[in-house]
Image (cartoon, coloured by chain):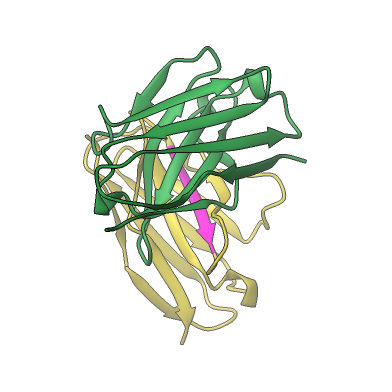
Chain colours: A yellow, B green
Amino acid sequence: DIQMAQSPSTLSASVGDRVIITCRASQSINTWLAWYQQKPGKAPKLLMYKASSLESGVPSRFSGSGSGTEFTLTISSLQPDDFATYYCQQYNYYSTFGPGTKVDLK
Amino acid sequence: EVHLVESGGGLVQPGGSLRLSCSASGFIFSNCAMHWVRQAPGKGLEYVSGISSSGSGSYADAVKGRFTISRDNSKNTLFLQMSSLRAEDTALYYCVKGGQGDMIMVADSWGQGTLVTVSS
């Protein structure tokens, strides 16, 4: 099984900050990685797929990079709507989600 | 617009069974892979099971042999038959639509979930 790790588990930031979340896979997954955003009481929402492709309708302040085992999700300028929990998902071999990174207000 | 509505959740005793349903609309259901993803209270996301457009199913190790995924393309409905339920199966179960091509395992649309509670 492919295991996913995310860091940090919690990130405290202010509006306007540049935010970077890291996701690591236990073995190479090429670029078969997606990112999701989940707000309290809501279903997750797809943000990125294939590591760096932006889902339609997602603001361009979100970007993704990486390949192999290490990936990042960057929010260039954090907005009030971005406070949420973010999950990575590998889909190279079946599917595994990371444990999540909560972005909260500093 | 894609619309996914789950039903069938509830309280069940350990060892019991439950059948979840997901009614889909707004897309060509028969062309899409579909999945179930669960989230235990206060915890992260966990992939449970998926079924291809042709009906081939796959399962996470945690549910293999206990859960069965199926679909009725004539009724645009996805099912998850759960048996031998355990306390650790307690979670909100999301119905998820897969993408196309190399994105079939990517969850591009989610329902609002149905809560399964396993407790005596």
Q: How many marks?
A: 0
- Quarter containing the N terminus of chain B: top right
* Quadrant where the C terminus of chain B is found in the figure: bottom left
Q: Nearer the viewer, residue A101 or B59?
A: B59
Reply above or below: A97 against B119: above
Q: Position of residue A76 (x, y in %)?
A: 57, 66
Residue B99's x, y, as percent?
58, 30
A1 displayed left or right of B116? left
Q: Percent position (x, y) of residue A91? A: 40, 34
- Give the side of residue B9 with respect to residue B2, left or right: left
Residue A96 appears anywhere in the view: yes
Q: Residue at x 45, y 33 (%)?
A: B80
Image quadrant in which you'd find residue B74: top right
**Which residue is outermost to the bottom?**
A106
Of residues A12 and A37, which is closer to you in this image? Answer: A37
Residue farthest along the top direction in this orientation = B54
Q: Which residue appears at 41% of the width and 48% of the height?
A: B38
- Identify which residue is drawn at 54% across, 51% down: B113
Q: Is residue A11 magenta?
A: no
Q: Let me know if residue A54 appears in the view.
A: no
Residue at (37, 67) in percent of width and height = B42
Q: Is residue B27 left or right of residue A37?
A: right
Whether A28 is drawn above or below A18: the answer is: above
Question: Quick check: B108 left or right of B59?
Answer: right
Secondary structure mostly seen in magenta is strand
**The image quarter in which residue B100 lies:** top right
Q: Where is residue B43 shown, x and y percent of the image? A: 35, 62
Could you say which is closer to the camera, residue B81 or residue A20?
Answer: B81
Q: Which residues are magenta?
A: A33-38
